[in-house]
Amino acid sequence: MSYKNILKIVCVTCFVLLANIKPAISDSLLSAYQKEYAYLEEQQRNLVSRLAKFKADSLAERKALMTKLDRLSQKFRKIQNQSKNMNDMTFESERTLESAKDNRDVFTSTFDQAEDTLKSYAVSSVVNRDDAADIKVNVLFSNAFDVLSDVRSIRKEKGSFFSATGERVEGELLHIGQVATYGRSGQTRGILVPAGGGEFKMWQQPAVAVTDSLFANKKPQQLEIFIVENRLTAINTGTDKNVTEYISSGGMVGWIIVLLGGLAIVLIMFRAAFLKSASSASEKILSGIKTYITTHDIAGAQAFCKRFKGSTSRVVSATLRNIERDRDHLEDIIAESILHESPVLNRFGAVIIVIAAVTPLLGLLGTVTGMISTFDIITEFGTGDPKLLSGGISVALVTTQLGLIVAIPALILGNLLSGWSNRIKDDMEKAALNVINIYDAPQLAK
């Protein structure tokens, strides 16, 4: 319900109430009421007018704000698109920069490899790193063409080399490219191999006839040649390693494994000799006391057992000392005696098994150590020279082999000796029970 309607209802109500009042109300009160009513109507019209104006102003201001908001939204989207484009451009620039760095690294690596390759052919000129790229390319290709011309030529020159006795001699050198060389100096002639530092030495199989034919510009019937990778790396005569050198190639871990293997051999020999003695004693004791037991000569049987030393003698003696007891108690005494002798029969068995378990782990330790050493060398020097890597690889492979060589026999023999020990325990128990049965046999017969 609107304000105007409420006001009319109030006025009508007042009018009705006034109409019902007695005519004693004065005309002045009615006039005052009419004035108040007219004032209220005027206020109503002003309020309605102000409300309409406020609504119109609010609508206009809202439209202006919406227009401004649209402009700001468009500007924000535009800035956002620009920011995204700038991020894309930044990312693309970073990719371009990374690609340029990679290309530069590849370019530098290529030049380094080219220099190393040329140095292996004794090319002394080295590219200056401060030169421009085109100058570097020209220098490297110029040196490469010189090397190609050299490696495809056969030439003779004056020079010196080391004879088979290690003496330097002057003579002639015949180079077949950069891969093979023959030398001649008086009666000393044959195939030459690099001795390091650009020097040559006589090979152990000189091929004199082939050398004479080549120096005489004749074609040999069969070409004996020693092809080398480059002249700067010395060629060493291969020799077979002895046992000490082979173990030493495994480093300190290799020697530790060998020492443990020697200890295992000694313990196995002692344990085998001890078990053999214990096994033979069981048979001798049982066969010797049968006659005493049959005649119930316990003192004689005990005196016979004292002639022997070992676990079987002690178990049988304990049986003879308590043979008059009831059988259940006697069997408990026998079991206790065998348990008491078990540590003696198991002597060195645990140590042998431990060695069999530890040596493969030591071999694995040597393998890891050798591989770490190899990767350290690769990190520092690269993979260009395999000889630098041979030390770490030798440790890695030799220690593993030594560990398995020690562990496999130690494990097999240790288990076999443990089984032998268990059989001896069974034989002792059988011997003790046999003594009881022989002793009780005449009584059972009655």
Image (cartoon, rainbow, N blue to C red):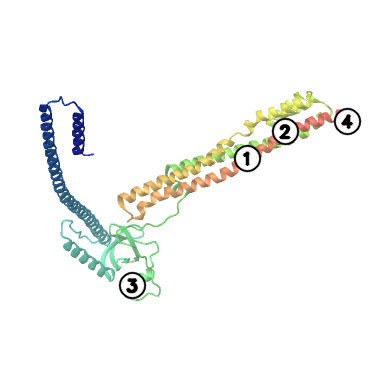
Residue 214: mark in rendering: 3
Foreground residue, 330 or 68?
68
Residue 302 in picture, x, y percent from top left:
76, 26
Closer to the eye: label 1 or 3: 1
Foreground residue, 212 or 370?
370
> Which of marks 1 and 4 precedes in the sequence?
1
Circle 4 is placed at which residue position? 445
> Local crowd at mark 4 within 10 Å, few (<14), some, or many (≥20)?
few
> Which of marks 4 and 2 precedes in the sequence?
2
Closer to the eye: label 4 or 1: 4
Q: Secondary structure at mark 1?
A: helix
**Which image quarter holds the C terminus?**
top right
Real-space CA distance between mark 3 and mark 4, rounded to the nearest whole angstrom:
107 Å
Determine which quarter of the picture holds residue 124.
bottom left
> Local crowd at mark 2 within 10 Å, few (<14), some, or many (≥20)?
many
Residue 417: mark in rendering: 1
Q: Is residue 370 above or below residue 110?
A: above
**Which image quarter holds the N terminus?**
top left
